[in-house]
Image (tube, rainbow, N blue to C red):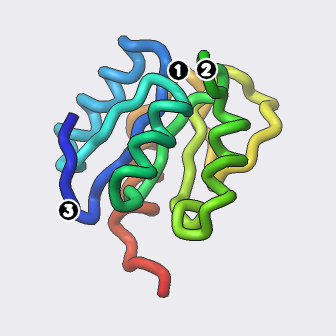
Amino acid sequence: MKVGSSGRRILVVEDDADAREALVDILEVSGYEVVPAENGKKALEYLKASSPPSLIIRDLLMPEMDGWEFRARQRENPELARVPVVVVTAFSSANVDANDILIKPIDVDRLLLLVKQYVDQEPAQ
């Protein structure tokens, strides 16, 4: 797990180890700093211990804490509530609170476009 304050840090929350590793690899090769978490509970633990990332990419169905509960908890903290969220899911009609949704299997070009849109933009004041 790489941790720092590059301003291009992305938290990837995915319970499937292969999918999580693939997302991490794609993003790191593209020059982003990536922090993986296997579920919402681990992701919240990370967020409480560090500065907010530039973006959160998360799954919906995960053990211990699913994506819906994670988002509700994220929104309880005003600083974390501002972090954009991209949901990665197999459900094409999922009811989610997110900035964007990517349907599995992921279109890598679309993923990178969304990441660039949220991470490489000027921070909101």
Other residues around mark 1 within 10 Å, as few (<14) / some (14–19) / many (≥20):
few
Q: Which of 56 and 72 is in front in this view?
A: 72
Q: Amino acid type of disc 2?
A: Glu
Q: Residue furthest bottom?
A: 125
Q: Which of 97 and 76 is in front in this view?
A: 76
Disc 1 secondary structure class: loop
Residue at (36, 50) in percent of width and height = 49
Q: Nearer the viewer, residue 56 or 28?
A: 56
Looking at the rendered image, the disc whose residue lies closer to the viewer, 2 or 1, is 2
Sequence-wise first label, 3 or 2? 3
Q: Nearer the viewer, residue 110 or 67?
A: 67
* Residue position for label 3: 6
Expressed as whole percent of the image width and height from the top left, the position of residue 35 reads: 31, 39
Q: Do the residues labelled 2 and 1 touch (CB within 8 Å)?
A: no
- 19 relative to 2 in the view: left or right: right
**Mark number for residue 64?**
2
Q: Are marks 3 and 1 in contact (CB under 8 Å)?
A: no
Disc 3 secondary structure class: loop
* Residue position for label 1: 105
Looking at the rendered image, the disc whose residue lies closer to the viewer, 3 or 1, is 3
Other residues around mark 2 within 10 Å, as few (<14) / some (14–19) / many (≥20):
few
Q: How far apart are marks 2 and 1 (CA)?
A: 24 Å
Q: Amino acid type of disc 1?
A: Pro
Quadrant of the image containing the N terminus: top left
Disc 2 secondary structure class: loop
Expressed as whole percent of the image width and height from the top left, the position of residue 76 reads: 68, 58
